[in-house]
Image (cartoon, helix red, strand yellow):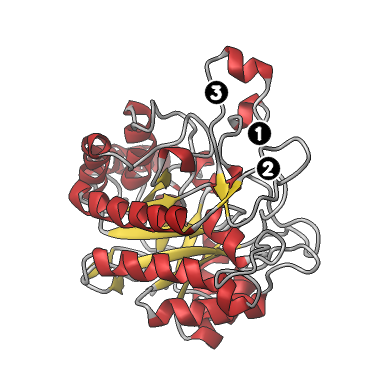
Amino acid sequence: MSKLFEPVQLREIKARNRIVVSPMCQYSANDGHVTDWHLVHLGKFAQGGAGIVFVEATAVEARGRITHGDTGIWSDAQVDGLARIAAFVKSQGAVPAIQLAHAGRKASMARPWYGNAPLTQADLDRGDRPWQIVAPSDTAIGEEWLKPKPMGERELDEVKAAFVAAAKRARKAGFDILELHAAHGYLLHTFLSPLSNLRNDQYGGSRENRMRFPLEVAEAVRAAWPADKPLFVRVSSIDDVQGGWDIEDTVAFASDLKNVGVDVIDCSSGGILGSATAATKTLIKRLPGFQIPFAERIRKEAGVKTMAVGLILTAQQAEQALKAGSADLIAVGREALYDPNWPLHAALALGVDPQYAQWPVQYGWWLTRRDALLQKLGVNR
């Protein structure tokens, strides 16, 4: 039996396999509203055999968008479009999931194909205007970046309430899994890291204090999210910058997250400095599966389920990680963009589905006949 294609039970939600399509920003929303692009983009992955399909980082506040093209869930008006996606994903046998996010000091920037950096005059000419951003402290990412407003008690309460309201909207839209984005230099991550959190109140200083606000958000969202549905949290396992957040910190954070009812830790890394897509590159090499050891250590030491992500390229690599006990779930991102049928091809590669039974019937019917014809012709595929 393949571990990758073993169903997984998360509270009362059961996924058909352990393959997850990561949240991947498309920067193509219309004032926070998803479009047909998002429906087709995410629908392909559900058709392609994934067990769980995540909607991209979805802003809980308008000021929490990375760019003008980010999806949003800060308004009831945005629910119907998301509900259409959740319903289609579910109709194809996958579990619909959504990541809730707040960009913090990485908000109000240019879309990647327009520079992936602070807004320029060219962006302003396109109609993308900057807005006031917030963060734990007033330190910007760099000299040219917007300077954030430090969050006072009112802003902390507003953001926490926004996450809770977003969770309720996600439930209304029909999602079965929720994830909080606490990685990659976005708001919750910047509270955790000593490089970005320079506060001297109860939310800054010691590790315990720096974890306080993200844990408050997780606890409040868990209370608002149905008890029978799982809650994930994406973390940067390490800042990958000298003096930053490290794996020991993440193990402690994961233990506290488990205690407030979080079910899965999504183990990424990096991003505290630089652009919104800056990733691990300074202390460890980016090699296939380079983040799997983070998932393994957090799983073993914090006693919580983990999801491995990052340059997981092949079915064999994913299978090995699961069988070794390094993680409970495998997330693919860019590999899914390259091949939306990655899970179905993985099932073929591992000998799980040689007869295309897991493919949509509209495809499998044709492919079995194609293989029969190729066999007659003596063509090996």
The residue lying toward the viewer, choosing from 243 and 337, is: 243
Residue 376 visible to an observer of this rendering: yes
Q: Residue, x 69% and y 67% (percent of image)?
A: 194
Q: Amino acid at mark 1?
A: Asn
Residue under pointer 3: 129
CA gap, disc 2 to disc 1? 6 Å
Q: Callout 2: few (<14), some (14-19), or many (20+) C-alpha neighbours within 10 Å?
A: many
Q: Position of residue 39 (x, y in %)?
A: 32, 34
Residue under pointer 1: 116
Q: Amino acid at mark 2?
A: Ser
CA gap, disc 3 to disc 1? 15 Å
Do the residues under discs 2 and 1 have CB atoms within 8 angstroms? yes
Secondary structure under tag 1 reads loop
The mark that comes first in sequence, 2 or 1, is: 1
Q: Residue, x 27% and y 40% (percent of image)?
A: 82
- Of tags 3 and 1, which is closer to the observer? 3
Quadrant for residue 18, please give it: bottom left
Q: Position of residue 321 (x, y in %)?
A: 55, 72
